[in-house]
Image: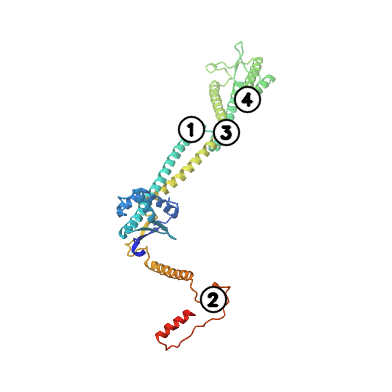
Amino acid sequence: VALMVITPRFEATTTVMVEPQRVPNDYVKSTITQRLEDRLKTLEQQITSPDVLTRVIEEADLYPELRGEIAPERLVRRAAKDLEIHVSKGSIFSVTFRGEDRQAVAAAANRIAELFIEENLRRRETQAEGTTQFLQSELEETERQLEVQEKLVSDYRLRNAGSLPDQQATNLALLSQLDKRLDIIRGELEEAQLRKAVLEREAVQLTPSGEIVTAPSESPEAERLEQLQLELVELQTQFTDEHPDVIRKQAEIAQVQSRLGVRAPVEDLSEAPVKGQPSSNSELAELEIEIQQLEAARERNLRDTAAVQRRLEQTPVVEQGLIALTRDYDNLKRSYQELLAKQLEAKLAENLEKKQQAEQFRILQRANVPIAPYYPDRLQFAFLGLGLGLSAGLGLALLRDRLDESIDSLGHLRRDFPAVAFTIAIPVIEVGQDQSSSGKAKDGKLRRLA
């Protein structure tokens, strides 16, 4: 009766296999790192949404007799209840759909499996594109910060050109060259001043009265004058003419010359040379020009030396500032390079997803139209009916025995009448096997009588 009353239900199952990535993971790393079970749960929530299930109900023609009778929300809940997704061990999962229409359940199982595949592809592509876009935006922001930091470093190096740490060796070499050049200039200047002093000492000087005299070379004052002139030359090789020691030494020389009655040579002595005086005015003029040039070169050398020394003194301070700027620049540059590498990997992974070379779902076995219903199970119901029938028969027999109040044995008699004493018991009279049916009937009476 149950098999005749119960409406049979059918189920169809579509098996889906997860294919691994076709390109080795060592070459292209996928940006999808979520586990398969978690992804299937997410996809299941997406597939079992009311919008998707409503579309499946329409496409698979599910519940045609109920569409106009109950609300669409109830149909969606019933479809979600009839749907089952089972994840097997490994990389296989199945989509099972149950219902009363064998054609509809097969179509629904296959369509839901196809939706799993489509949604998985869409989500993977969307996630890969989102990863690429995020890394691209971060890369552009880091590049902008890197350009700003590069500008700061460049401006700082430009402002402190000459005092940079990497220019210290150049400055030291330049300082050594300047020192050597200064020694050469001082030597040349000392030699020129000595020649000038000798020429001036040997030159013929005019007395205030116009007489031509020569400074006595053997007098102590003359020796003093020569010594002072040598000291002046030595000072001038070290200091400028405005230095106090140089000025003081020139004043001493002027005093000695005034005591000796010697004054500067007449400018036009070269035009009227006196007998016994060498024609040295032109040579003295050349020496004056040479000395001026050497002094100017010495001044330039001293200024350049001082500038190089200042740059060397500023180098430690400049180095500290440059280290701070360079540290930030190096960190940004390292971040930029890392982001660039990740962005390239993400782009490859995105292309891998778009070309469907990454991990994807494929239908391993499509759902066929079921032949026999899965419910009710006829064999199971048959055994169940047999068990229930036997149980009911035994139960009724026990119940009848419990309700029967007749006495059919001596034990029942003694149990029902414990206070009554029995003096005789009539045994059952056995009759032969060859007795007639009337004899058997009589035997039955005797038994009942007993």
Circle on res. 155: 1
- Residue located beneath label 2 in the image: 411
Q: Is residue 349 above or below residue 280?
A: below
Q: Earlier in the sequence, mark 1 or mark 4?
A: 1
Q: Quadrant of the N terminus?
A: bottom left
- Residue 2: image location, x then y, percent: 36, 64
Choose mark 4 or mark 3, whichever is in front.
3
User: In the displayed structure, does residue 176 sit left or right of residue 336?
Assistant: right
Q: Residue at x 41, y 48 (%)?
A: 346
Q: Which residue is mark 4?
A: 235
Per the image, label 1 sits on a secondary structure element best described as helix
Query: Which is more foreground, mark 2 or mark 3?
Result: 2
Q: Nearer the viewer, residue 352 or 332?
A: 352
| Distance from the alpha carbon under mark 2 to that under mark 3 | 124 Å
- Looking at the rendered structure, the secondary structure element under dot 3 is helix
The first of marks 2 and 4 along the sequence is 4
Where residue 289 appears, as percent x and y from the top left, is 53, 23
